[in-house]
């Protein structure tokens, strides 16, 4: 008997539980990677994201476009009513929303919930209610989500934090590539300062030939922990900083990957879904828009030809089987690149958790047919007053997505626009997330430029 899946949420339920009549409680704890970092190891200094944390902590609203009608989404604040009305008119935002008692902007959604006993009690009552078959579905699992699951009595639908931590290490990705025979960028895994020196000796010929190296924190997130090394002086400066820490702390352990820098045509991201019985489904590939290691959006479809797509697909299935063998199931996204020679490097790193692509899946299914193009991206705003959704919608006007036209900007997160607001007249940065849908790459570009012009004028006026 063939199971008919009406949306991605239904597909996810079947994969993670083998059931359809369950309630998923979505906990979209972005940047959970911060809680996977090991203690007792040395790290290079990393720039603080400061008030940007306030914005990142409101990215949980993206889950409005992922949760199904019978599901629950946990939020830091009540969504804007006009934003929700627009979402519902397009077939989304029909799940139940449960918000924290008090939104602490500095806390991510899980930490915030753990400081809200009344909300925890409400969810515990829900888990104990007769006929309720609920599962907790986080973006990714750390000790925090396991504690939240224990307190509420809502079981996790995904693996333990130990499994997440293991398979999201960049060193794990490299070891898996070697085991599976997947084409791999020349590089080394380094767990001590001595290994880093030895690894550099192996790779410094790249610098002598005019190339570059890149040093990556194996548990780094959102572009943090990445250092590009263009010459020996830069490497020795990094070593000097680490050695200075080592002498103070009395340890020499690190967790870095040192790799050759590959000049590329584009970044790629593809997703797989691994079910509880080990089945692996390839969910597709997109071009990733990346600036200084930080994700900016996706272009759909990718420019890959059939041969290149098959390289990605084959790697995806093999990686999925290996992840399942090592205890992981659920969603996983792999970063890849297409280099200037047209060669695919299929697995730079595994992100075994939800990805930004995850939150676009239902939108693609509903409003992005194969003959259309999509551009998912974030826009940065510089404001000194609260920006109302109605004002933004009015200013964008015909640039907003309309099903009848089949094109325009579909906003899928508004909370991040005003998340860093503190007081009237004080400058702050906000983000607007959306997906542009159009009939061609040229139309995508034209609509994107028009949106940027409108947002620029809002910046100036505000």
Image (cartoon, helix red, strand yellow):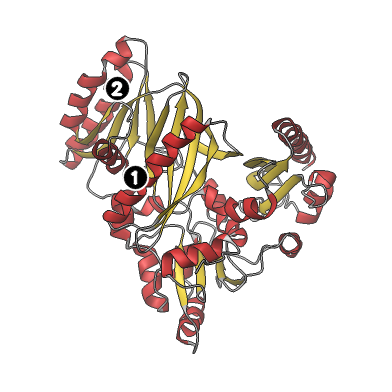
Front in this rendered view, residue 331 or 311 = 311
Q: Can I make out residue 211 in this image?
A: yes
422 left or right of 274 in image: right
Of labels 1 and 2, the one closer to you: 1
Quarter holding the C terminus is: top right
Q: Which residue appears farthest toward the top when viewing the image?
A: 209
Residue 199: numbered disc? none
Element at label 2: helix
- Tell me the crowding category of disc 2: few under 14, some 14 to 19, or many 20 or more residues within 10 angstroms, Cα based: some
95 left or right of 106 in image: right
Q: Which residue appears farthest toward the front when viewing the image?
A: 1
- Tell me the crowding category of disc 1: few under 14, some 14 to 19, or many 20 or more residues within 10 angstroms, Cα based: some
Front in this rendered view, residue 14 or 357 = 14
In the image, residue 118 sits, relative to residue 25, either above or below, namely: below
Q: Which residue is mark 2?
A: 235
Q: Position of residue 349 (x, y in %)?
A: 37, 40
Q: Which residue is mark 1?
A: 318
């Amino acid at each position: 008997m063939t199971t008919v899946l009406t949306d991605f949420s239904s597909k996810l339920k079947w994969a993670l539980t083998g059931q359809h009549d369950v309630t998923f409680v979505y906990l979209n704890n972005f940047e959970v990677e911060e809680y996977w970092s090991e203690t007792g190891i040395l790290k290079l200094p990393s720039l603080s994201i400061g008030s940007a944390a306030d914005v990142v902590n409101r990215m949980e609203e993206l889950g409005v476009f992922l949760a199904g009608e019978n599901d629950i989404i946990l939020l830091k604040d009540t969504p804007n009513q006009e934003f929700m009305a627009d979402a519902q008119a397009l077939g989304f935002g029909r799940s139940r929303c449960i918000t924290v008692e008090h939104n602490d902007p500095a806390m991510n959604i899980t930490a915030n919930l753990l400081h809200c006993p009344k909300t925890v009690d409400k969810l515990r009552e829900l888990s104990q209610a007769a006929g309720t078959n609920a599962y907790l579905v986080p973006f990714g699992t750390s000790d925090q989500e396991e504690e939240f699951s224990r307190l509420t009595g809502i079981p996790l639908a995904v693996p333990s934090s130990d499994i997440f931590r293991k398979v999201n290490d960049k060193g794990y990705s490299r070891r898996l590539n070697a085991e599976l025979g997947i084409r791999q960028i020349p590089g080394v895994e380094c767990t001590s300062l001595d290994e880093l020196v030895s690894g550099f000796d192996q790779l410094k010929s790249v610098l002598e030939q005019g190339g570059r190296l890149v040093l990556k924190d194996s548990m780094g997130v959102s572009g943090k922990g990445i250092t590009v090394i263009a010459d020996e002086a830069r490497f020795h400066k990094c070593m000097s900083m680490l050695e200075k820490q080592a002498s103070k702390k009395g340890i020499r352990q690190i967790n870095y990957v040192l790799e050759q820098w590959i000049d590329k045509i584009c970044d790629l991201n593809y997703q797989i879904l691994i079910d509880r019985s080990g089945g692996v489904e390839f969910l597709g590939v997109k071009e990733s828009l990346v600036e200084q290691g930080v994700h900016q959006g996706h272009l759909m479809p990718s420019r890959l030809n059939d041969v290149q797509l098959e390289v990605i697909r084959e790697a995806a299935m093999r990686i999925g089987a290996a992840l399942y063998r090592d205890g992981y199931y659920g969603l996983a996204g792999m970063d890849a690149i297409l280099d200037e020679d047209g060669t695919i490097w299929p697995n730079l790193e595994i992100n075994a958790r939800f990805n930004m692509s995850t939150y676009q899946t239902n939108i693609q299914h509903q409003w992005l047919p194969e003959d259309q193009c999509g551009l998912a991206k974030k826009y940065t705003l510089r404001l000194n007053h609260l920006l109302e959704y109605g004002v933004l919608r009015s200013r964008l006007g015909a640039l907003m997505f309309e099903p009848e036209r089949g094109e325009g900007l579909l906003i899928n997160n508004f909370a991040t626009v005003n998340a860093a607001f503190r007081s009237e007249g004080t400058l702050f940065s906000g983000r607007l997330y959306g997906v542009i849908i159009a009939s061609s790459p040229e139309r995508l570009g034209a609509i994107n430029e028009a949106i940027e012009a409108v947002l620029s004028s809002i910046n100036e006026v505000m």
